[in-house]
Amino acid sequence: MIGGGRGAFIGAVHRIAAIMDGQAQLVAGAFSSDPQRSKDSGADLMLPADRVYASYEEMAKAEAVRPANDRLDFVVIVTPNHQHFPPAKLFLESGFNVVCDKPVTFDRKQAETLRKIVAKTKKVFVLTHNYTGNPMVKEAREMVRTGKLGEIRKVVVEYPQGWLSARLEDTGQKQASWRVDPKRSGAAGAMGDIGTHAENLARYITGLEIDELCADLTTFVKGRKLDDDGNVLLRFKGGAKGVLHASQISVGEENNLNIRVYGEKGGLEWHQENPNELIVKYPDRPSELWRRGNGYVSDVAKKFTRTPSGHPEGYLEAFANIYAEAFRAIRAEVGGEPLPEDLDFPTIDDGVYGMAFIETVVKSSKLGAKWVKFPKT
Amino acid sequence: MIGGGRGAFIGAVHRIAAIMDGQAQLVAGAFSSDPQRSKDSGADLMLPADRVYASYEEMAKAEAVRPANDRLDFVVIVTPNHQHFPPAKLFLESGFNVVCDKPVTFDRKQAETLRKIVAKTKKVFVLTHNYTGNPMVKEAREMVRTGKLGEIRKVVVEYPQGWLSARLEDTGQKQASWRVDPKRSGAAGAMGDIGTHAENLARYITGLEIDELCADLTTFVKGRKLDDDGNVLLRFKGGAKGVLHASQISVGEENNLNIRVYGEKGGLEWHQENPNELIVKYPDRPSELWRRGNGYVSDVAKKFTRTPSGHPEGYLEAFANIYAEAFRAIRAEVGGEPLPEDLDFPTIDDGVYGMAFIETVVKSSKLGAKWVKFPKT
Amino acid sequence: MIGGGRGAFIGAVHRIAAIMDGQAQLVAGAFSSDPQRSKDSGADLMLPADRVYASYEEMAKAEAVRPANDRLDFVVIVTPNHQHFPPAKLFLESGFNVVCDKPVTFDRKQAETLRKIVAKTKKVFVLTHNYTGNPMVKEAREMVRTGKLGEIRKVVVEYPQGWLSARLEDTGQKQASWRVDPKRSGAAGAMGDIGTHAENLARYITGLEIDELCADLTTFVKGRKLDDDGNVLLRFKGGAKGVLHASQISVGEENNLNIRVYGEKGGLEWHQENPNELIVKYPDRPSELWRRGNGYVSDVAKKFTRTPSGHPEGYLEAFANIYAEAFRAIRAEVGGEPLPEDLDFPTIDDGVYGMAFIETVVKSSKLGAKWVKFPKT
Amino acid sequence: MIGGGRGAFIGAVHRIAAIMDGQAQLVAGAFSSDPQRSKDSGADLMLPADRVYASYEEMAKAEAVRPANDRLDFVVIVTPNHQHFPPAKLFLESGFNVVCDKPVTFDRKQAETLRKIVAKTKKVFVLTHNYTGNPMVKEAREMVRTGKLGEIRKVVVEYPQGWLSARLEDTGQKQASWRVDPKRSGAAGAMGDIGTHAENLARYITGLEIDELCADLTTFVKGRKLDDDGNVLLRFKGGAKGVLHASQISVGEENNLNIRVYGEKGGLEWHQENPNELIVKYPDRPSELWRRGNGYVSDVAKKFTRTPSGHPEGYLEAFANIYAEAFRAIRAEVGGEPLPEDLDFPTIDDGVYGMAFIETVVKSSKLGAKWVKFPKT
């Protein structure tokens, strides 16, 4: 693991998600850019001292020369955004599979470079857009795919949070600090951090690609350099329309990612904070509550469920579902076998798409919220 | 009553709302542009034949010459949009107070003319933007007014419906037919019919005025001439931002008007389909469920409630609250007294504002969804 | 109207419900046992002084001798429980139809006497167990009737309120005072006031009759003479089981009447505070949200709806639905025609059943919460 | 691990919960009473063959003689109820700490014997009444403890499920088969399986002990020998009253464990299927939504949370919280240190209490649902 030391949030999430199904173990790490903090964090995690590294460079070097049966199968990158690309490149090129937190890189150019590196090294690269790991999100995608909703007309996707409604960054809170810093976070604030999740979720479920967008980003909290709120109109290829908004100043909201999709024949609604339920809507009969774990859900959703209906699964289980798919790929890669064809995890392509999304919303907003064509990715 | 004959929807609503509190009685009407239908409708309503008129012109004339103690105190106009202005003008100028359904007129020009007529005749003119009659909407406004939420930053207001997701107009359904007809409905479809409610609700609660907007209107159902869906970005005077979307093709949605307002210090959320509850959000403590009829709500909301907490009030009661205020004004006017100063109903100014909203969203959309300044009203 | 003067609650509800559909008008009343209060209340309601009476006896006498086309069609009794029987008897015997609030009388004996009077006078007698006026309650009954749920196995019906969790009666609050007074309320407190609603709702929906019950009533607030909370186990004829509990000390609850019914093939759930929705459950497919006003609901529910789906109707509309049926009966009776055969309102039989319920729960509780057979009614 | 082989449900849950936080590893098991199935299951779990045993007796013997640094720290028992006691006894007496699924034993007598064994061996014994691992359940307990609700008056606790509404046991479904078999399940069916969870949850939150109870158990599905539904009235020591019902024939219900507690000053409500939220109610101010992970929750709840607010945790995380506490005890025991004093997991005492509950409800029901005193435990 690269990053995820003391004071970090997402590192612990990855550790739980990765081991939950008994398929992986944490064996080594460079947990901080501060060598002492890395060391201390490794000790917290009960790792042997010789596999806790002062830097990711040191780690890549040392692990690469370990015997095959005692070296890493993959590395997990959970650093702030500006520190995704360098270790990803290094580990891929050192022969390791990589699991990387989102957004994939600091900017779109890096993402495209990374795509070339992935292609060249032929290693597995997994991007943890974790929300698509939710079984009922997969069910939703299946409904769209199989035509249950008819042609999609409208998508409303939201990601309101409230935790940055005041200057939390001034308190030294680590999560806040780097997210509001353009040097570490990238060109966008809320849009990069969570707007990309909303974009990814919409695309995952509907399969629709953005044709052009019009984004109005705002920095409400004085002194901030990046957006802490953004409202975006979307036009998808094929004629569907969309609204996407994300915010970190929507006071009182926790992590309220949600999506509504309306087609010619039906609609659906899903809320991340109530992830076990998918509401399905019809023009002429009662709405239905599709719930995880029941016999009537599709095999696609069944595959990603651990407990029976009524035993709520949540954020960590969804995250672990991304890992479960990653492990299928990594096991094949490590074993020298061809990758399964039905892998279901976000890839470097999703990463490039996400960076293009960030670039485009920022561009649109800087032009005064004008319509901007979505670039080819 | 003008309009509201057999097959109409909103006429019956007005009749119930107007009499609910025992303060008014239906005494006369021109219920249809078809004289026979008007006659039949009057008979259904148990009106004496001599006060059921073949046309509103005939009615205005006949009623105006009745003795003061036996004539109309006010007239209610519930015709399709293009038939609001002529009777409104005629009755105002014939000395009657007028209650008129929304949107106020066919276009903005008519609305401004009507404003002059109202000013000149000094009659009471009430526009039934009924949703603002909800007690918890009034509570929400009070919270904003008294600063409980701090300065408002973001407003999200939605009005999704699904009833026009297919060509209902082809079945002869009367409500659908005129709404999709630009000659009767005006320049906008969904935006005029329900987008104006969303705009009105947002302005009522927050007091914010739109500075400029960017609207992407769409006609999804083939063959229609007016929008059946629209997504709008808003910039309010003073810096707040907003998202407004309204739709009649959001399949499975009934009448899901809802609003979220986020300020510096707090937020609130209200759903028309669950109108007795207002969710209030804070940065640092649990969200609260404020419910109609409880001792803790403000006097403003208490004034507009008929039953104790837990006895749900709904659409008709909210509508009746608009009438309750209208009656305070009408009673004063009829009695020759000055109008109360604290009247709380939508006026011709709201009507003009609403027509400017329609005009502006249509203009923006026709320009390809460009930002357009909101005109002075 | 008998009762319902200043300070009363349910009188105003009856007045709104009765006139809502333009089918009735308040023309006379004896609004209080205090003649001056009756007079003042009549004036508030804009009644002519000569039809506001000092007592119900005076009213019965005076109204009975008015010409047929200018006398009452029916009288509404909204006094505290102990004052139901005397006016009901008098008006029935004076030739008037009667609408009476629940519970029907002070005790079961009075109820049975009243039943004989109703039978003898052949007047219409309507008991306003208002919750059965809800369209989705009627839909629920229809589902049970048509076998959609299969044979019913279990019923859970609850009516928690919190408004009497402290000694509100000490503050002079009129509603609280008489409800906690055994001389005015009868043998039961919470069980009589709201437990009877729960019983009535369960019986209305399922058609099941209680075979025996075991009731544990409690008085939590010191100094009270009647129960303010009660838990009851039910055994229905035919083998179904039930749980019924009602409370006025369930702090924070408003008027949370709700019911769940489980059959062999399906289940349903309805909440009075969210009355437009009926949740229908299945063993093997998603639960459905059946909502008032949609095309898919049965004719039975459609008949009792005034507005389209998504326009919430509530307590007053449900109450008005009881009146709508009452008016069908009263119109026939006044017109000398046979009563319609499909009338759907609670009758004196429901009243007698309700009084038997009160008697039986009190008896069971006094025996230490032993099982007691439900008497024949 | 004892039990939990192929086809089992709860074994997999324990495995995930135990390893989630990286504090334990599965190293050995006797996964089935069928040696081959045990072997196969062990292979599925990637255990070395020499630590997969044909029987728990073999396992106890073999593990006991392994070197201290390479033997089990604890054993987990996840067999059907009738197979809890024998391995628990054996492993405790062989010097191992034990984690055991609920209900603790086949009958109350066994439970009391086991209590003596625990006392004598001084080993750690943990009973996985998992729902009390939920952070918001702990918050609820804290609220009661600190007097926020005042003296408790009423408790309503429910556990409706629908999965046994038909004869699932006839299909060979393993979970169903043993649960309806009195030889494996014990004296009660639904009441033993899930009624005990309801009882445990109520006692955990309120601290109230049952004084006497009246239970009406029913077998709705023909041919079953044990109850599949039960309704219980409770009288707690100190005067509070309660209703407890559990069911496996409540068609359409998943795992709807929920509780409402009403005190003199406040109330609370928690639903297992929406576990991140606790509704807190007051007599005179708005209800509040207390949500896991926020700054305002107590330290007690904070301690048992892995992710920030809005990142839903669920069943597995709650289960893992029981393990987290178990590990604190086991680590101390294995290290020869005194156990921490603030341990928070269900113990053998809870097990004995639960068995007394089962015994008492069955006794009451057999007497025709008479009141029966709760025995001393």
Image: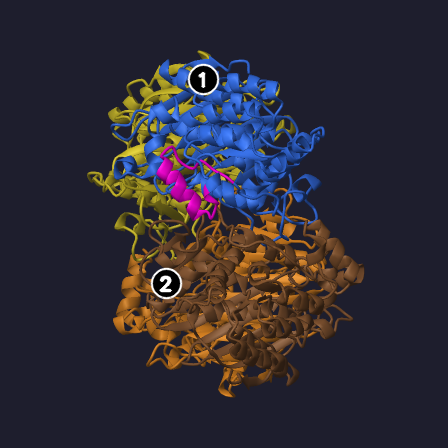
Chain colours: A orange, B brown, C blue, D yellow
Q: Percent position (x, y) of residue A191? A: 47, 74
In this rendering, would C167 be left or right of C282?
left
Amino acid type, mark 2: Phe
Picture mark count: 2
To which quarter of the image does residue A133 belong?
Answer: bottom right
The residue at 41%/77% (across/down) is: A185
Q: Percent position (x, y) of residue D225? A: 55, 18
Q: Secondary structure at mark 1?
A: helix
Nearest the camera: C37 or D105?
C37
Q: Which residues are magenta?
A: C28-49
Q: Residue furthest top?
A: D367
The residue at 27%/24% (across/down) is: D237
Q: Percent position (x, y) of residue C113? A: 51, 16
Q: Residues within 10 Å of mark 2 (few under 14, many from 20)?
A: some
Reading the image, the residue beneath label 1 is C360
To which quarter of the image does residue C338 belong?
Answer: top right
Reading the image, the residue beneath label 2 is A9
Q: Percent position (x, y) of residue C267? A: 60, 35
**Vertical side of A122 occupied by A314: above or below:** above
Nearest the camera: C162 or D207?
C162
Q: Secondary structure at mark 2?
A: loop
Q: Are marks 1 and 2 on the same chain?
A: no
The residue at 67%/54% (across/down) is: A282
**Vertical side of D102 occupied by A341: above or below:** below
Q: Residues within 10 Å of mark 1 (few under 14, many from 20)?
A: many
Q: Is C36 included in the stretch rendered in magenta?
A: yes
